[in-house]
Image (spheres, rainbow, N blue to C red):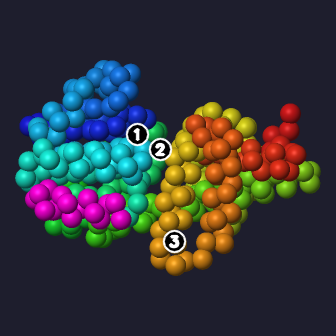
């Protein structure tokens, strides 16, 4: 492992944790980000930063992309395929659309490079601890080779199936999480206005059939109104919801419920809450109800 080089494109909250654990796992890590502060931070934990992506593409055995939009994923990997050597591997841990992943998979295969869509769950805390959940789409035979690397950055690694399968699971997961957060917000508002504190409602939910992991992750922010404690940025969740909606429409699935969720998140983002935690969607409901989950 000591001679294997991993390039990481995107050194934000997720990329930084991934890099930390790759370094601890014995990999040589080359890093690129448009943000110099992000590069300085990963240099301090053992990565070799560079201002030229092409230098990374030429050298590495594995390339990890952690980027905020499908367009950036397309542009970055298209560039990478020009320079990377045959027999190398690309792991895209971004959340993107299924069509993009499948197109890149074929382009990479034509260059004799293995590509995997590997979207993540667990947030920056999970990335830092090396405890991410990673769902993977791509060639099952090649997955055997990338599995040890994934186990360095994640705790639950699940090979799903052909290219794009990882993205499908991630998008379905995130629309459900977004829906639960929205419904929790509504239920808390209803209960509080009717006379029961939200903390008591949440406590009993977690003891009953409404128990949900989303509560354990985002509940604290909902219950104390601290949406600056970012577990997963609202604008990123909004992007994932949009991608899910595109997928559902492509598959001709009615979107009665998800369309409502999309509207709440779009409204929250358009009202300047995009860089707050996903739980900030509750503020849209609070404004509509003229009531607060946490009364002042």
State the image coordinates of residue 91 (x, y, percent, origin top left). 26, 51
| 34 left or right of 77 in image | right
- Answer whether residue 107 is magenta in the image: yes
The x, y position of residue 23, in whole percent, is 24, 33
Residue 214, given in percent of the width and then of the height, sits at 60, 54
Quadrant where the C terminus lies? top right
Q: Main secondary structure of the magenta part?
A: helix
Task: Identify which residue is drawn at 63% across, 58% down.
Answer: 262
* Label 1 secondary element: helix
Which quadrant, please, contains the N terminus? top left
The nearer-to-camera label among 3 and 2 is 3
Q: Which residue is mark 2?
A: 123
Q: Residues within 10 Å of mark 1 (few under 14, many from 20)?
A: many
Q: Which residue is mark 1?
A: 14
Q: Is the residue under label 2 in contact with that under label 1 (CB below 8 Å)?
A: yes
Relative to 252, does residue 234 appear above or below in the rendering? above
Disc with the residue nearer the chain's start (1 vs 2): 1
- Magenta region, residue range: 99-113
The quarter of the displayed image where residue 159 is located: bottom left
Residue 58 appears left or right of 289: left
* SS of the residue under disc 2: helix
- Precedes in sequence: disc 3 or disc 2: 2
Residue 144 visible? The answer is: no
Could you tell me residue 252's position as x and y percent?
A: 52, 79
Q: Residues within 10 Å of mark 3 (few under 14, many from 20)?
A: some
Q: In this figure, which residue is indicated by the disc labeled 3? A: 248
């Amino acid at each position: 492992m000591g001679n294997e080089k991993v390039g990481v494109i995107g050194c934000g909250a997720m990329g930084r944790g991934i890099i930390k654990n790759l370094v601890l796992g014995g990999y040589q890590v080359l890093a690129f980000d448009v943000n110099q502060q992000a590069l300085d931070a990963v240099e301090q934990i053992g990565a070799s930063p560079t201002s030229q992506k092409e230098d990374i593409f030429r050298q590495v055995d594995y390339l990890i992309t952690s980027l905020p939009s499908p367009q950036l994923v397309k542009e970055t990997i298209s560039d990478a395929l020009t320079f990377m050597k045959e027999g190398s591997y690309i792991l895209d841990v971004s959340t993107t659309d299924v069509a993009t992943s499948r197109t890149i998979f074929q382009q990479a295969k034509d260059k004799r490079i293995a590509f995997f869509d590997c979207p993540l769950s667990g947030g920056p805390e999970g990335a830092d601890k090396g405890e991410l959940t990673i769902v993977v789409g791509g060639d099952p035979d090649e997955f055997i080779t990338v599995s040890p690397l994934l186990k360095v950055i994640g705790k639950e690694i699940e090979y799903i199936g052909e290219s794009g399968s990882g993205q499908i699971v991630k998008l379905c997961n995130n629309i459900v999480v977004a829906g639960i957060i929205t419904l929790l917000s509504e239920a808390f508002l209803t209960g509080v206005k009717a006379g029961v504190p939200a903390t008591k409602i949440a406590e009993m939910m977690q003891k009953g059939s409404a128990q949900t992991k989303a509560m354990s992750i985002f509940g604290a922010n909902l219950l104390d109104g601290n949406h600056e404690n970012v577990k997963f940025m609202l604008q990123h969740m909004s992007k994932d919801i949009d991608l899910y909606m595109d997928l559902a429409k492509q598959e001709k699935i009615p979107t009665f419920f998800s369309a409502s969720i999309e509207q709440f998140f779009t409204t929250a983002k358009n009202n300047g809450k995009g860089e707050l935690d996903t739980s900030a969607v509750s503020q849209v409901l609070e404004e509509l109800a003229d009531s607060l989950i946490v009364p002042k």
